[in-house]
Amino acid sequence: MKKWARALYQPGVPLNGDKRVTMSEEHRKLSCNAAKEGCVLLKNEDGILPLSGSGKLALFGKGTFDYVKGGGGSGDVYTGYVHNLYDGLSMLGAESYGPLCDFYRSYVEEEYGKGCAPGMISEPALPAEMVADARRFADTAVFTVSRFSAEGSDRAEVDYTGEPNPWAGETTMPGELHRLFPKRDFYLTAEEEALLDAVCGAFDRVIAVLNIGGVIDTTWIRDRQQVKAALVMWQGGMEGGRAAASVLLGLVNPSGRLTDTFAGRLEDYPSTEGFFESHFHVDYTEDIYVGYRYFETIPGAKERVVYPFGHGLSYTKFTRELLTVEKEEDALHFRVRVTNTGAVSGKEVAALYFRAPRGKLGKPASVLAAFEKTADLAPGESSELDLAVALEQLASYDDLGKIRKSAWVTEAGDYHFLLGGSVREAELLDYVYKVESDVICRQLTSHLAPVNLAKRMLADGSYEALETGPEPDINACIFEKLSPGSEEAMVPAAKGRPVYMMMHPYAEGVHPLMDVYEGKITSREFVEQLSDEELIDLLGGQPNTGVANTWGMGNQPAYGIPSVMTADGPAGVRLSADCGIPTTAWPCATMLACTWNKELVEAVGAAGGAELKENNLHIWLTPAVNIHRNPMCGRNFEYYSEDPLVSGRMGAAMVRGIQSHHVGASVKHFAANNKEVNRKNCDSRLSERALREIYLKPFEIIVKESDPLTIMSAYNAINGQRASESRELLTDILRGEWGFKGMVTSDWWNRAEHYKEILAGNDVKMANGYPERVKRAMEMGALTREDLLSCAQRVVEMILRLD
């Protein structure tokens, strides 16, 4: 097929010969396998798991049928079917107590018939005699809990009503959460606790199954004697129920590990205190001490952890052994042997952590440095893995000049390494990397420094004061701003097709974009042909074509620029149900991260990229790599981890897979987008060190390892600068420091000013641009043609990389 044929003509042609790849058997199997590998076994006492194939089960909880395949908003996907836990167990031959299943099935179907979303219905009261009858049928109970969250709201009753919002789901979600979860959905509801009491009163063999997209309270799993085992099945996509059942029944050995710390209470996370303090700002006072960096470092915090970062059990046993350590140029290579010493085959993770000297800057007690996962190992079989650590990973960012201001510094002292799975089980290695004197790894320039963050946490749990300045106005504009909220859901206008297109393909005398592809002219020479009006149009979103529903980019037929369409992610290529094209629903991003398997995530990316391309779409709006700063963020299911290395490496793998088909990934949301309530007007206030070490780091890893075609700027502001209007973020850091070669798009319908985005290096405004406002800025001298040309050149260079 010729270049851009799918963009230009929307052919209904399968990607591979006469066989469609979209939701193909191979992709459904891959989705199931990814879900199997992402399941995390939290607890397994008395060998209750795996279940015997001939055992009888009593399935309690509406979550048995009320299965949440993934979160809401852009992370949702229209798919062909969904297998819940009951489906999975039944398909694999397990025998469950029928009347109990009939009760829950009928209830869930009735609630769905009322328009309730999966995971957003209350736990029904169960007749007492049914518990007793179920106990007479089976001696093992499965207690399932499900949770749902969505884009546009957090996991709480808090809402912002300061501007119009046409999205009904976002406006009703906080109220529904308050009705269903008066203690917030981190905790079991009173109805769930009552059911658990009844089940534990009748059964002494209880298995908990968690169908969740983010962290919840698990103290009841740890503390209840009757709860012998617990499996986190996450939100596992279309095949999640079958995957979880395969693990419960021992058809698959669990090998998933947590990529977040599960603490006992919301208040145990330091970021909870100020999470909803204001609709208009969030103070990141915990600084770099996020997740396990907090719990393993700050005095008294360890005791609050129920299940630590990296925790996950197996049905077999493994040993890890350090073989050699070699220093090669600017990296350390740890050669590790992992051996299956148990009785069944399985996979295992080797995670390497380091402990840096506290020094002048202060450091977390442990930091993940590298990780790899074995293939399936038979009993007695070994695998050797190379865990590579760049020496620069040992450095800390000095934002205040305690050693060298605005530099990455490796402080003098001894650097120790620990090998294991979880951060708690990792064992100290007999190897020390010695740094004789402070090393300046990279000298940078201060960017996006805080102006209104009063304090930040130190390694001993105390706080240091920071200088503050005048409150910046994130809405500053050279002319009157649009009415807040009036931008929402605006779409680009359709264009008429020029008459000359009937006679010859392009405008008279122009060099079409194909001439750039064929090397006849440069991309700069090409964009210089366009008028100011045409350039401005190119820098805004374009009308949908084909099955697209999130609009496109390009669309200058007079110059041979195709209109390339976008599609939401990351749980699948999200098409409207009206199109009648179901796509594969993948496990949520958190579950994919819990596989700790970069090759598997890359395969999922490649499959998703193939479905994107087959449906004549070109840019998949994924991966989302924001940090799990706090469990209450309603969009955590779309993100990978509390750890920047896991987030970056998984995101890089996803991008490599997607772009292997010569379509584009759009890595989002750049950056520090960790809260949904009033996300389009909220300022993330954080130190430059926390920004660089935690919140920018996943994006930096992805840019350097996988060369994404596009980055999506975030809705929020960062230290008083809207992300899409920040030249420091998009030009100085992203392009200047990291060498990003692609283009930047805004998130859809943000509250930023189009001309300011162009000045910052945000190349396309989605879903639509504001040409009249851009032209007015040019007339006022705030914007030049050169500014337009720079952005336009990046847009066409991105399109040139697409098939």
Image (tube, rainbow, N blue to C red):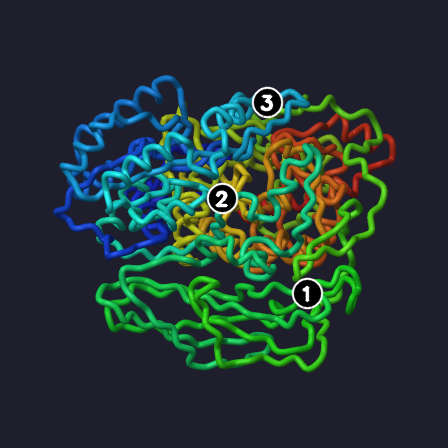
Q: Amino acid at mark 1?
A: Gly
Q: Secondary structure at mark 1?
A: loop
Q: Position of residue 716 (x, y in %)?
A: 67, 38
Q: Name the image quarter holding residue 539.
A: top right
Callout 2 environment at 10 Å: few (<14), some (14 to 19), or many (20+)?
few
Q: Position of residue 496 (x, y in %)?
A: 60, 21
Q: Amino acid at mark 2?
A: Lys
Give the label, 2 or 1, closer to the camera: 1
Among the two numbered marks 2 and 1 on one chain, the one whose residue lies closer to the N terminus: 2
Task: Work out whether 94 lies above or below 337.
Answer: above
Question: What is the spatial separation of the Cα atoms under label 3 and label 2, in whole angstroms?
Answer: 24 Å
Numbered tag placed on residue 267 in the rendering: none
Numbered tag placed on residue 3 in the rendering: 2
- Toward the viewer: 527 or 58? 58
- Toward the viewer: 435 or 459? 459
Q: Position of residue 728 (x, y in %)?
A: 75, 49
Among the two numbered marks 3 and 2 on one chain, the one whose residue lies closer to the N terminus: 2
Question: What is the spatial separation of the Cα atoms under label 2 and label 1, in whole angstroms?
Answer: 53 Å
Give the label, 3 or 2, closer to the camera: 3
* Quarter of the figure with the N terminus: top left
Q: Amino acid at mark 3?
A: Ala
Can you identify the residue that label 3 sits on?
Answer: 494
Give the label, 3 or 1, closer to the camera: 1
Task: Pick out the residue farthest to the right.
Answer: 780
